[in-house]
Amino acid sequence: MKKDLRLHPRQAEILKVLLFNPKPRFRDLNVSGLSNDHFSFHIKSLVEAGLIVKGESNYCLTAVGKEFANRMDAEKDIPQVEKQAKVGVLIFAVEKQGGVKKYLLQQRLKQPYFGYYGGVGGKLKIGETLLDGARREFTEETGLSAKLSFVGVNHKMDYSKEGLLLEDKLFFVFRADGIKGKMTEEFQGGKNFWLSMAEIRKLPKLFPDVLDKLKMIEAGGISFSERKYFVDEF
């Protein structure tokens, strides 16, 4: 099943019925009173999508269908999958170079936020542990390995100057120490740089939350932060 599957309103109604009735009959699902041919088309589409399955005399959600339908806003007359915050991992590596403490930052060279500087990270994959996700992202994007320590959770909401919500992200933040390997300086979508705090503060396109996250990784322990940001570019 495609993650971006868009349901016809009548198909969403069928899934809503199945959320609250485990084994309804064909007629019980047709809450809109469609013609049999028309309604059968929607039932067939849901079966082909792997969301429902037909038994001897009734229908039920498949395991995939249960997970999908559970993400719908069932309070609405015509339910649709609810938008939720993106979940990701974010890693800030720390290393002393020539007696100066430096942090590994990444310049983003893809949309959105083209040209901005931030930590190394990406989306957490379904079924992946936080630590495994952080290790994978760190190695994939830097070519390095390190000892990773979980330091906290950050809820970051980006708004336009006009107040439009652009992105809603929940980050699990890690600190990387004991760096090993040869760093990948440039890859499709970004560049990596070791920078001192003084250099970081001078960056023209620094994500507004970076300094807060660097405080988080230096504070010790585990912390939580939540903040709304208003950005000039997206």
Image: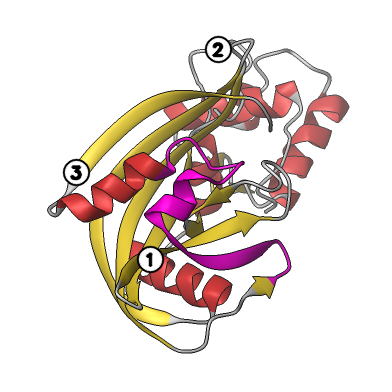
Which is in the foreground here, disc 2 or disc 1?
A: 1
The residue that mark 1 highlights is 102
Which quadrant holds the C terminus? top right
Looking at the rendered structure, the secondary structure element under dot 1 is strand
Looking at the rendered structure, the secondary structure element under dot 3 is strand
Q: Give the range drawn in magenta.
A: 187-210
Snapshot quadrant of residue 164 = top right
Q: Earlier in the sequence, mark 2 or mark 1?
A: 2
Looking at the picture, does residue 196 appear above or below residue 161? Answer: below
Distance in Å between CA atoms under marks 3 and 1:
22 Å
The residue that mark 3 highlights is 223
Which is in the foreground here, disc 2 or disc 3?
A: 3
Q: Where is residue 64 in the image (x, y as percent from the top left)?
A: 54, 51
Q: Which mark is residue 22?
A: none
Snapshot quadrant of residue 20 = top left
Q: What residue type is labelled 2?
A: Lys
Asked if one can make out residue 55 in the rendered structure from this viewpoint, the answer is no
Q: Which of marks 3 and 1 is nearer the N terminus?
A: 1
Q: Residue at x 48, y 35 (%)?
A: 208
Q: Earlier in the sequence, mark 2 or mark 3?
A: 2
Q: Which residue lies furthest to the bottom in this view?
A: 181
Is residue 15 left or right of 125 when viewed as pictured? right
The residue that mark 2 highlights is 76
Which is in the foreground here, disc 3 or disc 1?
A: 1
Distance in Å between CA atoms under marks 2 and 3:
36 Å
Q: Which amino acid does label 1 sit on?
A: Lys
Q: Residue at x 49, y 77 (%)?
A: 139
- 47 in magenta: no
Cβ atoms at labels 2 and 3 below 8 Å apart:
no
